[in-house]
């Protein structure tokens, strides 16, 4: 199998590049669907990616891009069908751009809501959607949550 998983660690682009005798940049371009890579090289790389079950390292990508590719959603109740529909719609809307949804439940509790917001911010979400059970003016506003972070309340 080559150097891909000799130590039970996740397969890296470096492993694929070494196995195929190409550069890491070539592997990266193929995986991201970019660049002027020959059809033959593209096929070889994609075949090896599949054989080794390569999974992108989103933490490493985030270090390079400065993005987490994650949007946080804080809702007051997980079991309410309205919030399930909101989560489904949001996840569907952000997926084409490469983003994933991280859902937090505040249990309709102001302190828990604050903690969930802070936990999502600590995970460096790129956006935050908040459905607060509190009335307007009682909850933190987007400008005070984190300047520069897109926060929408509904």
Image (cartoon, rainbow, N blue to C red):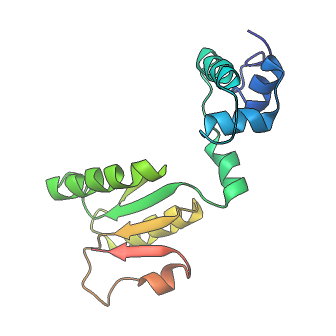
Furthest-left residue in view?
81
Q: Locate the N terminus and report the quarter of the image it occupies.
A: top right
Position of residue 75 relative to residue 25, above or below, is below
Q: Where is residue 32 in the image (x, y as percent from the top left)?
A: 61, 40
Is 62 placed left or right of 102 in the picture? right
Report whether residue 99 is seen: no
Residue at point 36%, 64% (across, down): 74
Residue at point 35%, 70% (across, down): 130
Q: Which of 65 and 84 is in front in this view?
A: 65
Is 4 placed left or right of 31 in the picture? right
Is 52 placed left or right of 131 in the picture? right
Q: Where is residue 6 in the image (x, y as percent from the top left)?
A: 78, 15
Position of residue 26 relative to residue 7, above or below, is below
Furthest-bottom residue in view?
137
Q: Which of 77 and 151 is in front in this view?
A: 151
Position of residue 34 relative to residue 43, above or below, is below
Q: Locate the C terminus and report the quarter of the image it occupies.
A: bottom left
Residue at point 41%, 48% (across, down): 95
* Res 19 quadrant in image: top right
């Amino acid at each position: 199998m080559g150097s891909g998983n000799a130590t039970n660690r996740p397969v890296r682009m470096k492993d694929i590049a070494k196995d195929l005798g190409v550069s890491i940049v070539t592997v990266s371009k193929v995986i991201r669907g970019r660049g002027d890579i020959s059809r033959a090289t593209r096929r070889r790389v994609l075949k090896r990616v599949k054989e080794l079950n390569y999974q992108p390292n989103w933490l490493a990508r985030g270090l390079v891009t400065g993005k987490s590719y994650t949007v946080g959603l804080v809702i007051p109740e997980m079991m309410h069908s309205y919030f399930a529909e909101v989560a489904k719609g949001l996840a569907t809307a952000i997926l084409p751009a490469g983003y994933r949804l991280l859902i937090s439940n505040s249990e309709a509790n102001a302190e828990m809501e604050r903690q969930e917001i802070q936990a999502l911010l600590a995970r460096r979400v790129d956006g935050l959607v908040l459905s607060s059970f509190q009335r307007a003016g009682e909850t933190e506003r987007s400008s005070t949550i984190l300047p520069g972070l897109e926060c929408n309340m509904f």
